[in-house]
Image (spheres, rainbow, N blue to C red):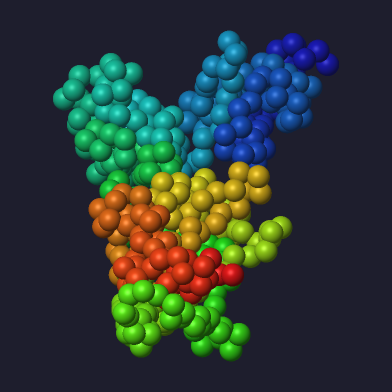
Amino acid sequence: MDPADPTASATVSPPETKNTLYARCASFPSETIFSQDDLLELDIIPNKNLDLLLQCTKRLTQEGLFKLLSHENRAVWRVVKKEDAQKYRTLSADEALVYSLIESAGREGVWSRILRSKSGLHMTVMTRCLKTLEGKSYIKQIKTVKFPNRKTYMLAGLQPSEDVTGGPFYTDGVLDDEFVHQMAKWTERFIVGRSWYQRSPSDPHHQPRTTKLSSTHHKPVAKQQLESKRNAALETPSRHGGSRAQQKELLPFPPGYTGYPTIAEITKAINTSGLSPVVMKEVEMKQLLDILIWDGRVEENSFTGGYKAVRLAALAVLNGSKRAEDDGAGSAADAAIHGWSALTEAPCGRCPVLAFCEEGGPVNARTCEYFAEWLEV
C-alpha cells in the first residue's frame, strides 16, 4: 500500500490511532520533542501514512494534548499532560496566552514586564489575566534574589531554581544570617578536628617544661619573685578563654599527613550531621569555605585540595572563646581592631618578666621556657 495514498487510512480509526499515539509519546520524558520522522518511527501510524499522521497531530493539538513548536526551522510537537490540557480549556484566549508564556519560562520564572512585551496585551488586560490565574492557583508570584522588587511569575506546581532563590542560604529571598553562621561554625570545628592534634593539660604525656633560673644577674631580683610572676601569667585568662595553664594545645601533624578534609568530605559530613534541612552541594559548600578563607580562619592546600584550620583560629574555637563564637576568630580585621599581631603571639610580645630579660641574666632567650612551649620543641 502506498503511504501517500489517501485511502490508506480508510480502514483505520483516527480516534483510536490518536489515543495510541498520545499514550506512546507520553511515556517519554516530559521535555521530549517529536518531529514528523520521530512520530512515524514509533510504528503507530499504519504504513507510515502521512495523511493519517496529520489528522492525529492536528486533533491532539486542538485538544491541547500536543503543543506545536519550531525547532531548527521545522515543526515539532511536545506532549502536554492531560491535567495541563484541561487547564487551557478553562481559560480565555488572553489567559491561555499569558499562561503559556509563564509555562515556557520554567523554574526561572518570568518578569511581568517581559510578559507584557511578549504577549502584546494591554497592561489592564494582562493584570486581569494574572489575577485570574493566581486565583485559580495556576501560577504564583515569587521573589528573586537578584531583583527582589520585580514581580516574577511561574507555575504554581514548580519550585524556583537556585539562581532565583539564592540557594539554601536564603529564605524567601533574604539571606539567613543565623543559618550561615551555624553552618560556618560547624564546618570550622570539623576542619579543626582534622587539622591539628589536640593535647589537653590532663594528658598524662603532657609534662610542662620547667627551667631553673640562673642567679647570675646584676639586678637584685629574687628568684621567687620571678617564679610568682610567671605563675600569675599562667593563671591569667587569655583571649582564647580560660587560663593559659588550662588551655588545650595544638600540635602539628607530621609531614606527609593526608587527613586534611577535602570539599567532598566536608559536604558529606555536613549532610550526614542533620544540621542543614536541605542537602548541600559542593558548589554551595565552596561558597561557605571561601568565607572562612577570607576571614583568615581556614586555608586551602592547592596541591591536595584539602582545607586546614589556622592555628590561632583553631585555638580560639577549642578553648571556647566568645570572640570565636561571635566575631569569627582569626580574621585579619578582627586582629587589627583588638591589637593582635604576630608579635603579640610570640612570647616576647606578652612576656610578664620582659624587663628582666637579657643575655646571661636569670631570664634570657636561651633558657626561656615560654619559647620552648610556643615552639613546642
Q: Quadrant of residue 161?
A: top left
Please identify the residue farthest to the front as the structure is shown. Answer: 218
Please give the name of the residue rendered at 24% of the width and 44% of the height, measured from the top-left corner. Answer: 135
Quadrant the N terminus occupies: top right
Q: Is residue 139 left or right of residue 373?
A: left
Please give the name of the residue rendered at 42% of the width and 72% of the height, measured from the top-left corner. Answer: 361
Residue 262 image point, x, y percent: 61, 54
Look at the picture and state if 43 lies above or below 314: above
Residue 279 image point, x, y percent: 50, 57
Quadrant the C terminus occupies: bottom right
Could you tell me if residue 179 is visible in this image? Answer: no
Look at the picture and state if 73 lies above or below 222: above
Please give the name of the residue rendered at 79% of the width and 22% of the height, measured from the top-left corner. Answer: 47
Please give the name of the residue rendered at 45% of the width and 49% of the height, measured from the top-left corner. Answer: 293
Q: Is residue 1 left or right of residue 354?
A: right
Residue 148 image point, x, y percent: 25, 38
Look at the picture and state if 94 lies above or below 331: above
Residue 326 image point, x, y percent: 29, 64
The mark tally for this picture is 0
Residue 230 or 81: which is nearer the viewer?
230
Please identify the residue farthest to the right as the structure is shown. Answer: 1
Look at the picture and state if 4 lies above or below 372: above
Residue 344 or 297: which is nearer the viewer?
344
Could you tell me if residue 302 is visible in this image? Answer: yes
Q: Is residue 273 left or right of residue 152?
A: right
Residue 63 or 115: which is nearer the viewer?
115
Q: Quadrant of residue 46?
A: top right
